[in-house]
Image (spheres, coloured by chain):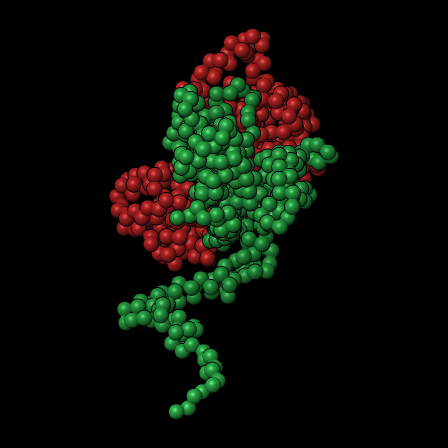
Chain colours: A green, B red
Amino acid sequence: MTIQHKMIEARPAPRSTVGPIAWLRANLFSGPVNTVATLIGIYLLYLLLTPTIQWAFINADWIGTSRDDCSREGACWVFVSARFTQFIYGLYPRSELWRVDVTFITFAALIAWLAIPRLPFKRWVALATLVAFPIFAYFMLYGGHFGLPQVPTHRWGGLMLTLVLAVVGMVGALPIGILLALGRRSQMPIVKSFCVVFIEFWRGVPLITVLFMASVMLPLFMPTGVSVDRLIRAFIGITLFQSAYMAEVIRGGLQAIPRGQEEAAAALGMSYWMRMGLIVLPQALKMMIPGIVNTFISLFKDTTLVMIIGLFDLLGIVQAALSDSRWLGFSLEGYVFAAFMFWVFCFSMSRYSQYLERKLHTGHKR
Amino acid sequence: MIHDDRLAWLVPAALMLGGIGSVQAATLDDVLERDQVRCGVNAAQPGFSALDDEDVYRGLDTDVCRAIAAAVLGDAEKVHFVPLDSVERFTALQSGEVDVLSRTTTWTSSRDTTLGVNFTGVSYYDGQAFMVASDLGVESATELDGAAVCTQSGTTSELNLADYFRANGMVYEPVVFDSPEQSIAGFEAGRCDVLSSDASQLYAQRMQLADPDSAVVLPEIISKEPLGPAVRQGDDQWFNIVKWSLFAMLNAEELGVTSENVDEMLDSEDPDIARLLGRDGSYGEGMGLAADWAYQIVSQLGNYGEMYERNLGSGSGFDIARDHNALWTEGGLHYAPPVR
C-alpha cells in the first residue's frame, strides 16, 4: 500500500460544470425542449438583427452635408449630423451656445461631486446645487444681465429644453411632493383636505390636458396684451402635476415607517419638524428611491408633450426637422436618434438609482 | 362663448378711449412699438413652414409673414414666428399672442363668421387630389374605378373621397391610416393603388418615397381648400395691411416686377408700376404705412411667383405646377385689385 505524502494538485473543475460550454449547457441546452427553444430564439434574433445592423451600420451613410450624399440603401445619419446642433440646442443663437455648455457642465460637475462619496463639503455643494445653481442657470441661459444678450425662451429647444424642463420639474416637484405627503397625513383638517383635494385633482387629469389648458384656455382669461411666457406655463403645469404623483410615492414611504419611531421621537421631546426631518424622512426617502426615480423617468419622457404648446423639445425639434423640404423622407433616422437619446438618459437615471440603493442600504430591506 | 365675452368687454373700453378708431389702430401701434410682427405658423409643414438647418423658418406661409414685416417695419426679418398647434391657432390669434395667423388655414364660412377672425385673402389654392404609381399608366382620376385608395381617417379628405366616387358612379376600397407618414408608407408598400390627400401634402409625401419619380399626382382637384392669412376681427387697418401685403406681391408679378429688377423698375414709365412702388402718389398712407411699402416687400422677398417657385415650385424640389395658383392672366385664380 502506498501512501502519497504529496497533495494531489488541484485540477480544474470538469468542463461540464464551469466555463462557457457548461454555462451554455446548463442555461440554453438543458433538455430537448430548451434546445429547440434556444435554436428558434437564435434564428429569430438573426432574422431581426441582420437587417437592422445592415440598415443602421453597414449600408448607412455617415459623411456628407446634404441628402445627395445618401444612397438610401441604409440609414442616412447625415441627416442627424447635419442637424445635430439644432437637435441639441434648438434655435438657441449659434454664437451663444457656450452658455448652454457651461451651464450643463456646471450642473454635471455639481451632481458628480454629490455622487462621489470621497469628496468633502457635501453640505455646501448640495446647498449650491439647490440655491445658487438655479440662479446661475437663469442668468446664463436667459441672460439680459452682465453683458450677456437676452435669449428669449422661444429660442430654447432640443435636448437642452428637455433637460431644463425635466430638471425644473424634478427639483420643483420633490419638495412640494414632500409637503403634500406630510399634509395628507396631518391631523389638521384644513391642511389635510387641501392636500387631498390638490393631489386628487392633479392626479385625475392627464398631463396633456394640463398643458393644453395652460396654452389654450389661460390666455383667454387674461387681459389683452398680457401673456405669460409659454415655457413658464409649461414649468408650472409640469411641476404641479408631478408633485401630486411625488406626494403619493412619498406617502407610501412614510406609511412604511413604524409608528413607534415617531412616538419614540416625540417622547424625547422633539418637535414635529425635528421628528420628520431627523427620524422619519431619512428612513422613508431611502426606501422610496425606486419609486422616486420611476416618477422622474416618467417625467423625463412626459416632457415630450410640450410639443402641443409649441415648444420644441428633443422629439419636437426632430419632428420639425423632418418637414424640411431638403430632408424629407428620413423620419426613421430622426426617430431612432431621439429614441437613443432618451434611452441614454433614462437608463443612466435607472443605474444611478440602483447605485444609490446599494450605497444607502442599511439592512432595511426584507 | 368666451371670446364673445371678451369682445363685449372691449367695446366700453374702446368707447372710453375715444371711439372705435383707437381700437382699429391697436395692432399696428403694437407692432411698431415692438418693432416685430408676431406671426402664428405651422410647426412643421413642408413647403409652407419648416425649419431649415440654419434655424430659419422657410416656406410660403412664413414668407407671407415676412412680407407683412417688410411692409410695416421695412425689414422682412423682423418677424417672431410662433409655432401653433391646429387647435390653439385661433385662440392664439384672439388672445393677441400673435398679430396674424398664417398657418395653412382653410378659409371657410364658419371660421370666418363665428371665430372672431377675418381671412384677408388666399395665399394658396389647395384642394384634394390623387397620387398614383406612375407605372400604372393612369392619367385621370376618372380611370380609378375599383381602386384601393389610401387616406387619413377622420379628415374631410375621407368624406370628399366618398362623395367624388359616388358622384362619378365608381367604386373604391378605402384603406385608412392615422398619419401622413403611415399613409405614404402604406402606399409605398403597395397596400393601395392611390393615395388621396390635399395636393400640397401629396407633393411633400411624394418626396418621401425612395424614388419620387415613381409616383405622379393626377390633375383632378376634388375639393376647395383656399389657404390664407387671418387676423383678429375689429381692426380694419391691420386687416387692410395684411390683405394688401399679399396683393402687392401678386400685382408685382403681374407687372413683371421682381426682386432683381425692382430698382430699375423704380424709373419705369408704366404708371401702374410707379404707383405700386410708391414713386407716384402715396398709397401706403391709407394703411398708416410708408409710401415705399410695396417696394420693401418686392425688393426683400420678390413677387408672388418668386415666392412660389422658391417654396413650392421648381426651386424647392416639390415641383408643384402653378395651375390654380397662377395669375388670372395665365389661367389661374390669383387676381389682385390694382394699387390706385
At x 60%, y 50%, the residue is: A116
Q: How many marks?
A: 0
Q: Is residue B234 visible?
A: yes
Residue B57, how many percent across, how many down? 57, 40
Q: Is residue B294 above or below residue B206?
A: above
Position of the C terminus of chain B, as image quadrant, is top right
Horizontal side of A333 relative to A66 (left or right) equals left
Q: Is residue A273 left or right of residue B73?
A: left
Give the camera-side residue of A167 and B186: A167
Image quadrant in which the N terminus of chain B is located: top left
Name the residue at 48% across, 85% down. Answer: A6
Along the viewing direction, whichever of A316 and A38 lies nearer the viewer:
A38
Q: Residue furthest right?
A: A147
At 59% from the left and 18% from the top, the residue drawn is B25
Nearer the observer, B93 or A247: A247
Coordinates of residue B8 in the picture (x, y in percent)? 46, 13
Q: Is residue B314 above or below residue A8?
A: above
Q: In the rendering, at what x and y percent does residue A145 appear?
A: 70, 32
Tell me: A175 left or right of B293.
left
Q: In the rendering, at what x and y percent does residue B191 appear? A: 33, 54
Residue at the image point whose x is 45% and y is 51% from the top: B206
Q: Nearer the viewer, residue A86 or A251?
A: A251
Residue B247 visible? The answer is no
